[in-house]
Image (cartoon, rainbow, N blue to C red):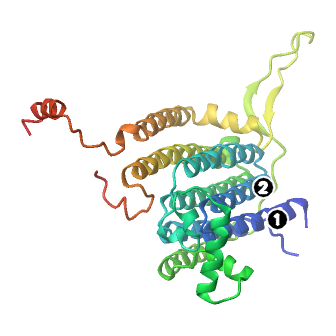
Amino acid sequence: MELQDILFIFCALVSLAGTVILLSQRNAVYALLGLLLAFLGSAGIFQALDAPFVAVSQVLIYAGALAVLFLFVLMFTDTRTSEDRKGLPRAVGSRANFDPAEFDAQTKKKRRKEGELPSALQAALDSIVLPKPLALVVALGFLLCFSFAIFKLPAQYDEFGPLPENYATGLYLPADEGAAPGTPATERVVEYGTTEAVSFTIFEGFPLAFEFVSLLIFAAVLGAVLLARRHLAPTPKAPEAGASAGHGAGHAGH
Amino acid sequence: MLAMLDPKTVLFLAAVLFSAGLYGVLSRSNLIMVLMSLELMLNAVNIALVAFSRHWAGQGNSVLGAHSGQFFTLMVMAVAAAEVGIGLAIIVAVYRRRNTADSEAASELRH
């Protein structure tokens, strides 16, 4: 077994563990940590597949920026739904201040009511979500279809071919200052997966798509700012007669 | 021993991660959890794309042909970042209006 095989197996296991945490945890912050684990494992898989630039981008964009964005929203809003609140004491479930004494008393009361020993197993069972059968059936059906398609792949997919030493780019370096006149210019070569090779692909192969993605991100930023503005909050009914009369005149044509 | 790092194994791992993300999207009612599972699905697609890129590099393609999978991975990352920005903004807007992030509360796109 080579080093890349070991890296791949380890990172695949990390990814799968993170996925299990993401799907099973009731608490959204723990689930986010599982997602982070899955992203970091994927970055290791990219590295094992000789794509170091994509691996670094994965850590920077997914594990860095997106995870922080998720964490900000989780911290700014109480996004727990009724299914997430199950198993949490009421003082934590509502948005009341957290009081350790009350938390302790409520936990004891709840345990006495349930009439069972406080066990680590019970606490662990309370913190995970039970599987939903219909969703499980659909997901396993998809997995079955994918597995069938992968099984039917032709034999050239049985193993990765050897990587070429380097790629010719058709670009030439300028000749050195002190070189004798008439020296042929050296062609610029790139190795597979390096930043040079990926940037050559972007700017020589698909520059228009690159520009359109920058436009897309610009539009997304504008849309996000517009959507999250505070005026979308429910407006209190204005008691002033003057204000409503002014609005009424404007809306009279409706 | 059979090498683990072959295209079929990597594609199968991507399929498992994609199905797990699909299960999360279908089973959770918390909108944030749905968005996180969606990210997992996009990430699984990225793994498959990088595996195909590595496969075609091993088949002796030119520099553009060998790297277009990695280029497409970067595009997917950019689109995913835009999607998360918009999605989280929508979740914050829904939360402000309904005081919950349950997907049942957002079944209608009006006030």
Q: Residue at x 73, y 33 (%)?
A: A169
Q: Marks 2/1: CA distance? A: 9 Å
Label 1, secondary structure: give it. helix
- Image check: A153 left or right of A191? left
Q: Residue at x 66, y 37 (%)?
A: A201
Disc marking residue A44: 2
| Residue at the farthest left position | A253
Which residue occupies the foreground of this view, B46 or A153?
B46
Q: Chain of mark 1?
A: A
Q: Residues within 10 Å of mark 2 (few under 14, many from 20)?
A: many
Q: Chain of mark 2?
A: A
Which residue occupies the foreground of this view, A139 or B51?
A139
Q: Are marks 2 and 1 in contact (CB under 8 Å)?
A: yes
- Image check: A190 left or right of A102? right
Q: Amino acid at mark 2?
A: Gly
Residue A159 visible in the displayed image? no
Disc marking residue A10: 1
Q: Amino acid at mark 1?
A: Phe
